[in-house]
Image (cartoon, grey):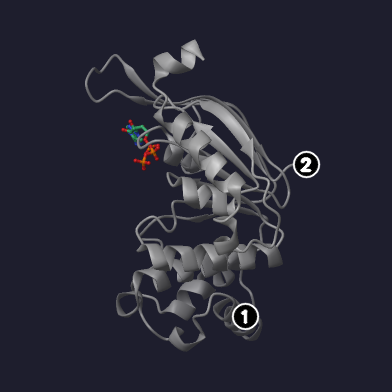
């Protein structure tokens, strides 16, 4: 089976303007993420990307359609993903504690995960005492502490400066290559999608529908600087920009 299987998913919310109306955020989306596949969902602001991810995570109920995942998904959000009252190590240990992993085993696993995300020296710091990039690494380490195979990420590096973002993308790729997770990664950045994904799924303006799926031809492991020199990088970038600019009436004509 695939890691994530979304079939004919619709999600509507009550309209804030008219009590008798609804706002359709996600319209008839079907999407499969294979085992060990990295899929990026790319779309304009407000097109329903986060809603799609929240439904996939089980945080919202679908209005119609189904979502199946290989295991309970772990989720990394853009911000506020860590508990401020716990240290970095305690945050990472949290899911292990919930699973009642014995203390000694938990300590070893936390040490391993902190090493993986480069936070060993900050284990006893609180989130307020570390940088935004370090907080996101803590979030990633905590999501990896879950033993499931499904990772859902909602613009996890969106709030970071460019240099930190690129460094974390590289780290995420390195970590992902060592694990066997299926990843569904939401972004509005063409560069981010091209850097990370095996496949990019493009959503339309709201109501969000899938308008295109593009296989990313770059091999792995990826050198994210070398990628930028590949002529295909520029070619796919322009294609994705064109898709993102499409207005609903152009899609109908296309
Ligand atoms: N809980 C909610 N109640 C009502 N409307 C909602 C709710 N959550 C999302 N929406 C609406 O659904 C639409 C899609 O929102 P969503 O956050 O999924 O978009 P997005 O593509 O993630 O946007 P961005 O890239 O700007 O974060 C928006 O019009 C939003 O107002």
Disc 2 marks which residue? 1
Circle 1 sits in a helix, a strand or a loop, which is it?
helix
Give the number of the disc on residue 143.
none
Q: Is residue 27 above or below residue 77?
A: above
> Is the distance from the Cβ of mark 2 to the nearest ligand 1 atom less than 8 Å?
no
Is the residue marked by circle 1 packed among few (<14), some (14-19), or many (20+) residues within 10 Å?
some
Which residue corresponds to the image point at 41% horizontal and 68% vertical from the top-left?
Answer: 164
Extreme residue toward the top, this view: 253
Residue 232, position in %: x, y? 61, 45
Circle 2 sits in a helix, a strand or a loop, which is it?
loop
Extreme residue toward the left, this view: 17
Taking the image in four quarters, ligand 1 sits in the one at top left
Residue 100, position in %: x, y? 61, 72
* Mark 1 to mark 2 CA distance (whole Å): 29 Å
> Is the distance from the Cβ of mark 1 to the nearest ligand 1 atom less than 8 Å?
no
Q: Is residue 84 above or below residue 8?
A: below
Residue 199, position in %: x, y? 63, 42
Which residue corresponds to the image point at 63% horizontal and 79% vertical from the top-left?
Answer: 109
Q: Is residue 16 visible?
A: yes
Which residue corresponds to the image point at 21% horizontal and 21% vertical from the top-left?
Answer: 17
Which residue corresponds to the image point at 64% horizontal and 44% vertical from the top-left?
Answer: 216
Left or right side of 73 for 49: left
Q: Report the number of numbered marks.
A: 2
Which of these two is toward me, 132 or 17? 132
Extreme residue toward the right, this view: 1
Is the residue marked by circle 2 packed among few (<14), some (14-19), or many (20+) residues within 10 Å?
few
Give the number of the disc on residue 112.
1
Q: Quadrant of the N terminus?
A: top right
Which of these two is toward me, 161 or 110? 161
């Amino acid at each position: 089976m695939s890691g994530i299987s979304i079939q004919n998913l619709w999600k509507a919310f009550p309209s804030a303007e008219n009590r008798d109306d609804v706002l359709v955020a996600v319209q008839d989306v079907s999407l499969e993420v294979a085992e060990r596949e990295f899929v990026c969902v790319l779309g304009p602001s407000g097109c329903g990307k986060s809603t799609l991810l929240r439904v996939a995570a089980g945080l919202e109920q679908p209005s119609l359609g189904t979502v199946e995942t290989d295991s309970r998904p772990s989720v990394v959000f853009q911000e506020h993903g860590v508990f401020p009252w716990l240290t970095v190590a305690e945050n990472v240990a949290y899911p292990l504690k919930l699973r009642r992993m014995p203390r000694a085993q938990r300590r070893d696993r936390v040490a391993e995960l902190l090493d993986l995300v480069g936070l060993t020296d900050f284990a006893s710091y609180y989130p307020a005492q570390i940088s935004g990039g370090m907080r996101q690494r803590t979030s990633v380490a905590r999501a990896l502490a879950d033993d499931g195979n499904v990772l859902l990420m909602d613009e996890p590096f969106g709030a970071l400066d460019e240099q930190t973002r690129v460094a974390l993308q590289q780290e995420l790729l390195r970590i992902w290559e060592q694990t066997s997770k299926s990843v569904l990664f939401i972004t509005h950045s063409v560069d981010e999608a091209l850097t990370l994904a095996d496949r990019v799924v493009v959503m339309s303006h709201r109501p969000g529908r899938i308008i295109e799926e593009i296989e990313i031809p770059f091999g792995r492991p990826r050198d994210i600087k070398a990628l930028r020199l590949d002529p295909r990088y520029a070619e796919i970038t322009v294609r994705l920009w064109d898709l993102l600019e499409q207005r609903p009436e152009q899609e109908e004509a296309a």
